[in-house]
Amino acid sequence: MNLDETDKRILKNLMVDARLSARQLALKLGMSTVTVLSRIKKLEKEKIIKGYTAIIDHEKLGYNLTAIIEIIGKKDKIMDIEAEIAKIENVCGVYDITGNTDTLIIAKFKERNELSEFVKGLSAIPNVDNTITHVVLNTAKEDFRLT
């Protein structure tokens, strides 16, 4: 789907504040509410807008540890491994990547022992050959919105 400037403006505003009503968004963009609503419905139908969520400060909820974990697995089983890992609650992202490792995971934990158990559990998944764990010391930026 090709996005025009109106679609892009709607998306940009929703990424900043998904709580904006269609009426508020229409006023802000100088458009009719009906136009904004129909554009949003079109973006939802095309799965460009997959849902609406809040941006949470995980550290304030006690998730003080962020880990970036590389996984090396059997080549014909990578997709199965990634699908299993994606189901785990602490996992924020699972990426099929190029390079020396096959998969990259970003996960958050409250305590070191949770991270330890998680990594041990990864090693127990069939066809996982090796894991390399990196603990994040400081987060300079964590925002996946492209605004």
Image (cartoon, rainbow, N blue to C red):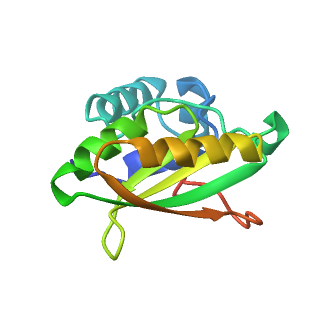
- Comparing 18 with 111, the one in front is 111
- Comparing 96 with 116, the one in front is 116
On the image, the x and y values in percent for residue 65 come to 73, 51
* Image quarter of the C terminus: bottom right
On the image, the x and y values in percent for residue 93 come to 48, 48
- Comparing 136 with 12, the one in front is 136
User: How many callouts does the rendering have?
Assistant: 0
Does residue 114 show up?
yes
On the image, the x and y values in percent for residue 109 come to 69, 42
On the image, the x and y values in percent for residue 88 come to 49, 33
Apparent side of residue 143 relative to residue 61 in the rendered image (left or right) = left
Apparent side of residue 2 relative to residue 132 in the rendered image (left or right) = left
Q: Residue furthest bottom?
A: 99
- Residue at left offset 52%, top offset 30%: 52
Does residue 29 show up?
no
- Residue at left offset 29%, top offset 31%: 42
- Residue at left offset 53%, top offset 26%: 22
- Residue at left offset 25%, top offset 42%: 80
Apparent side of residue 33 relative to residue 18 in the rendered image (left or right) = left
Apparent side of residue 112 relative to residue 123 in the rendered image (left or right) = right
Q: Is residue 84 above or below residue 107?
A: above
